[in-house]
Image (cartoon, grey):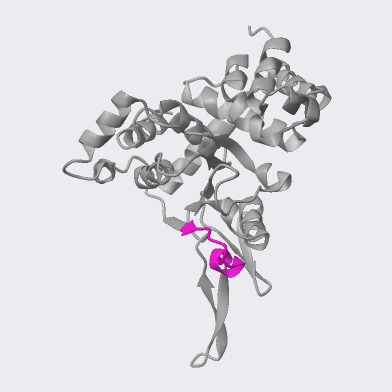
Amino acid sequence: MQKAVEIMREVQKVVVGKERAIASVMCAMLAGGHILLEDIPGVGKTTMALAFARAMDLSFKRMQFTPDVMPSDVTGYSVFNRQKGESEYVPGAAMCNLFLADEINRTSSKTQSALLEVMEEGNITVDGVTRQVPRPFWVIATQNPVGSAGTQLLPESQMDRFMICLSMGYPDIREEVKILQSRQESNPLESVRRVAGPQEFLAMQQEAGSVFASEAVCEYAATLAAWTRSNEQLRLGISPRGTLALVRMAKAAAYLSGKDYVVPENIQSIFLDVCAHRVLLSSKGRVAGLNARAVLTSALREVPAPGVG
């Protein structure tokens, strides 16, 4: 737990005023999930990914998902070696520990699907040969708000593969002044030190996964999910995959707070980040001028939390 906290401190050297977003990303990494950052350009999404990679000594690759990106750019491809008389595999961009898929909603659906296989299976298949990506493996994908030039909505099935969806937002004036001052003479990324390597982080993932979630806490998560499936302001509720992600994230949140068991507050603290991108508003919800987070906040108010003890 202590090393996970130290990693977050290193990232906070570079990403100013976004402690909650950093904690959510760390929880998703501990839970083995992928992260979707939905925001306008230039608010520090790429910088945060680079800082995590440096603090955890991860192999890192970034790809700008322009419309001309091909699936083979992500997965890799085979070329024939005349000297050896056999095909050789040329690794794609996703063959790394941390893959930053920038502006994922600008590329073609075929390329998005290629990335989806890597995210879901943890391996890459090229010409019938399956290769495992390095472990640990995460995708941090960014997407511009829908309506920006050249963007298209990700399908619900692909949105559901991301464990959390965050929006970092603009810094306030004080935070922006701090950002400007820190970059006058050097790049703050150069000050990020290595805290833990990939194998050490795999051990942390196992520790987070062993955190105990009682039957009452699991029932609380399932009841919240059931609420979203029956609410008239939503036409698509949380899937069972979403409920599993909710409990895994709650375990990671408990681990970060130094506990070996999950309490209802752990569920509540990550509920919106895990679930808001998995639900769709009904026509009634849209007419009422609501958004997904507002509706899910009502779930937290209306579904009673179990007692602990």
Position of residue 242 in the picture relative to residue 175 (left or right): right
Instruction: Give yes or no for residue 72 being in the magenta stretch.
Output: yes
Query: Which of the image's four quarters has the N terminus?
Result: top left
Is 235 situated above or below 157?
Answer: above
Is 202 situated above or below 255?
Answer: below
Query: Which of the image's four quarters has the C terminus?
Result: top right
Numbered label tally: 0
The residue under the point 49% across, 40% down is 203
Question: Residue 191 lies in what quarter of the image?
Answer: top left
Q: Nearer the viewer, residue 56 or 43?
A: 43
Span shown in magenta: 63-75
Q: Position of residue 133 (x, y in %)?
A: 55, 58
Question: Residue 32 lies in what quarter of the image?
Answer: top right
The residue under the point 66% across, 75% down is 127
Is 74 situated above or below 298?
Answer: below
The residue under the point 62% across, 42% down is 162
Q: Position of residue 306 (x, y in %)?
A: 69, 10
Q: Nearer the viewer, residue 187 or 267?
A: 187
Position of residue 196 in the picture relative to residue 30 (left or right): left
Q: Position of residue 17 (x, y in %)?
A: 36, 27
Question: Residue 266 lies in what quarter of the image?
Answer: top right
Instruction: Give yes or no for residue 33 being in the magenta stretch.
Output: no
Q: Is residue 305 visible?
A: no
Q: Position of residue 282 (x, y in %)?
A: 79, 30
Q: Nearer the viewer, residue 43 or 81?
A: 43
Q: Is residue 173 visible?
A: yes
Q: Nearer the viewer, residue 244 or 215?
A: 244
